[in-house]
């Protein structure tokens, strides 16, 4: 019991640090998008495609939290700028498969290089167990974000009506 105030204080510090990191991450993303002449939604789309390779327009809409109409406009803009290709899915002609053009990947990574180097140096000081703790923490946080996004989008309507 004597550790409860220290634990509560540590948790409050962790939550505060998480919020500040999130805020700075958003500001950082806006600065990178501006440097590349993109919107943050454009950048999120391109980052997502860099991670997954190809995705349907619907998957891009879900990941970026945009309407399908907004995604259609964004993808048209990104196609015209030469960042992506969009092709009809041969298995289902109603679906569009979007792919990041490989020759543009280096250009998109460039603004992150200095940050990535510094983050690498920071992590060098961590033991493997500490790194794995952080990986588990971020995996759990991502799952929580996805669940909360589903909730905000009304995906838990069945629970509300029960």
Image: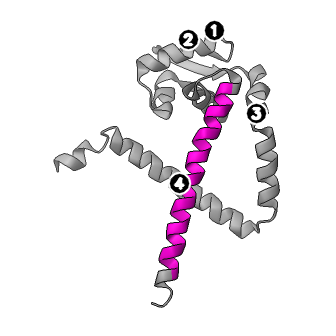
Q: Residues within 10 Å of mark 1 (few under 14, many from 20)?
A: few
Our reading of the magenta stretch's main secondary structure is helix
The stretch in magenta equals 6-34
Q: Nearer the viewer, mark 3 or mark 2?
A: 3
What is the x, y in percent for residue 84? 65, 17
Q: Decide: marks 3, 1 in contact (CB < 8 A)?
A: no
Alpha carbon distance from label 1 to label 4: 36 Å
Please give the residue where the numbered disc 4 appears in the rendered image. Answer: 19
What is the x, y in percent for residue 136? 59, 61
Q: Residues within 10 Å of mark 4 (few under 14, many from 20)?
A: few
The first of marks 3 and 1 along the sequence is 1
The image's mark for residue 92 is none
Label 1 secondary element: helix
The first of marks 4 and 3 along the sequence is 4
The first of marks 3 and 2 along the sequence is 2
The first of marks 4 and 2 along the sequence is 4
Q: Please name the residue shown 66% across and 33% down the image.
A: 31
The image's mark for residue 76 is 2
What is the x, y in percent for residue 155? 32, 41
The first of marks 1 and 4 along the sequence is 4
Alpha carbon distance from label 4 to label 2: 34 Å
Please give the residue where the numbered disc 1 appears in the rendered image. Answer: 80
Q: Decide: marks 1, 4 in contact (CB < 8 A)?
A: no
Q: Is residue 40 left or right of residue 107?
A: left
Alpha carbon distance from label 2 to label 1: 6 Å
In the displayed structure, would residue 9 be above or below residue 50?
Answer: below
Please give the residue where the numbered disc 3 appears in the rendered image. Answer: 111
What is the x, y in percent for residue 58? 46, 25
Extreme residue in the top direction: 80
């Amino acid at each position: 019991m004597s550790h409860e105030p220290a634990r509560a204080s540590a948790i409050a510090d962790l939550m505060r640090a998480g919020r500040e990191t999130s805020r700075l991450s958003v500001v950082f993303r806006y600065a990178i998008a501006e440097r590349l002449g993109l919107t943050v939604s454009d950048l999120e789309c391109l980052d997502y495609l860099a991670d997954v390779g190809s995705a349907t327009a619907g998957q891009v809409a879900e990941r970026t939290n945009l309407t399908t109409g907004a995604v259609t406009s964004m993808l048209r803009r990104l196609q015209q700028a030469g960042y992506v290709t969009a092709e009809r899915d041969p298995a289902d002609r109603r679906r569009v498969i979007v792919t990041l053009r490989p020759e543009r990947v280096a250009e998109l990574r460039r603004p992150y290089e200095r940050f990535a180097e510094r983050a690498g140096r920071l992590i060098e000081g961590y033991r493997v167990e500490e790194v794995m703790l952080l990986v588990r923490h971020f995996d759990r946080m991502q799952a929580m974000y996805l669940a909360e996004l589903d909730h905000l989008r009304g995906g838990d309507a069945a629970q509300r009506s029960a």
